[in-house]
Image (cartoon, helix red, strand yellow):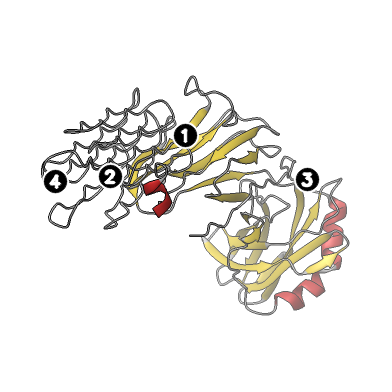
Amino acid sequence: MTFSPLSAADRQRPGAGHRVLSAALRGRAETVAAGVFCAAAVAPLVLPGTAHAQGSCTVSGPTTTCTFAFTGAEQAFTVPGGVSQVDVTAIGAAGGLEGVNNTAGGRGAQVSGTLGGLTAGQTLYVEVGGVPINTSACYVFSPCIGGFNGGGTSRFGGGGGGASDVRTQPAATPLTTTDSRLIVAAGGGGAGEVFSSSCPGSHGGDAGQPGQNGACDGGMGGGAGTGTQGGAGGSAPGGTPGGSGALGTGGNGGAGTGGAGGGGLYGGGGGGSLNGLATPFGSAGGGGGGSSLVPAGGTGPTLTSTAASITISYTTPGKSVTTVLTAMPPHTRVGLPVVLSDLVCPTAGSTTRPTGTVTFTDTTTGKTLGTTRLLLGLGRCAAAGLVTAFHTTGTHTITAVYSGDTVYQGDSSNPETTTVTVTR
């Protein structure tokens, strides 16, 4: 199996929004109205999403979403400027298969929540759990290893699945408390070893659940990890019981038919292995699943078969813009064309020309008149416009809402307005 690593990335877009009406800008808007009329004479263009890939992250407007897959190593995420909280979804790894008949390991957990109180430049350490991959060598020479980040080992059975978590200290820091871990999605327990098809193998426990007992007088499954302690190791008739789970790791599968317990908060336990001296031979117990840590106000844990990963998303305030909305003519008659144009300009210190769309709405009638691109450039500014007509008399209040883009923030909370007076 090959895993494609994804590195963490961050975007820094400082700035706080405000809108400045300028008579000078309004005059410049009117000088380009004829050009806007031509650009807007076609039907309004509704754009698809503006998301585009940037390294391991996807950007859509002010929201950036970064996805971390399993790499077998610690990864890092740097909190961008202007960001004090991030939304995280973590998925723990499944427990390992039993190597003879491929009995399934337990499923990992999915947990979501918001991590607040962050500061710009702070490093969060990202640990994505791995699924154990057992080889013939581990059956003979060494235990089958558990999944990265807390999975318990086993001899012949499946190893425990690793947890996925985000923490404030690197993994090299001794884990004496749970304070460093802000969110944890537990791993599943490993499957127990099978002796024969007449004694089917025992499944590893799903995250937060105990492993199955072995068939044909086999070993007991490992206990599930809880929020305060590791699960107990399963007993082993005629052999060695599985190890209990501990803080940050699942217990190891015993030399006999016992399964191991899940981690106290984290990885799944390894499945048990057979003891050739036991009579009769039976299948080994499955490892217990680990338990999760859900931030206050978060959701989960729920069980999932989705591959382990961690997704971090955040919203950064874009740079501010000034907008000027004009209607030409501002006084018209029913059915005659009116050109609406909105000039969008960066504030001082910004040189990138804005992109995105503007949505024009007649708030008097509640009708959306159309959404058009910023097309016409005027120095650092850009303009959007459309041609419309009014079919009822009176004063119509028009709003123009700029969508924002990857650099600039929109103005939906404080849109530009103007009025059009319509007579017969």
What is the crowding at mark 3: few (fewer than 14 residues within 10 Å), some, or many (at least 20)?
few
Residue placed most toward the observer, 406 or 168 = 168
**Precedes in sequence: disc 2 or disc 1:** 1
Determine if residue 94 is in view: no
Of discs 3 and 2, which sits in the foreground? 2
Few, some or many residues within 10 Å of mark 1 (<14, 14–19, 20+)? many
The front one of 274 and 105 is: 274
Q: CA distance from mark 3 to mark 4?
A: 75 Å
**Spatial separation of the CA atoms under disc 1 and disc 4:** 36 Å
Between circles 3 and 4, the one closer to the viewer is: 4
Q: Nearer the N terminus, badge 3 or badge 2?
A: 3
Q: Is disc 4 placed on a helix, strand or loop?
A: loop
Q: Tell us which disc is closer to us: 1 or 3.
A: 1
The residue at which mark 1 appears reads as 183
Question: How much space separates mark 3 and mark 2, taking CA atoms?
Answer: 62 Å
What amino acid is labelled 2 in the image?
Gly
Q: Residue at x 36, y 45 (%)?
A: 108
How much space separates mark 2 and mark 1, taking CA atoms? 23 Å
Name the side, left or right, on which 278 lies relative to 265. left
Q: Is residue 222 visible?
A: yes
| Mark 2 neighbour density, 10 Å: few (under 14) some (14–19) many (20 or more) | many
Q: Which x, y percent locates residue 244?
A: 32, 27
The reply to whether discs 1 and 3 touch (Cβ–Cβ < 8 Å) is no
> The residue tagged with tag 1: helix, strand or loop?
strand
- Element class at badge 2: loop
- Please name the residue shown 76% across and 58% down the image: 354
Q: Which mark is residue 20?
A: 3
Say what amino acid the circle numbered 1 marks.
Ile
**Residue with the mark numbered 2:** 204
What residue would you read off at disc 4? 215
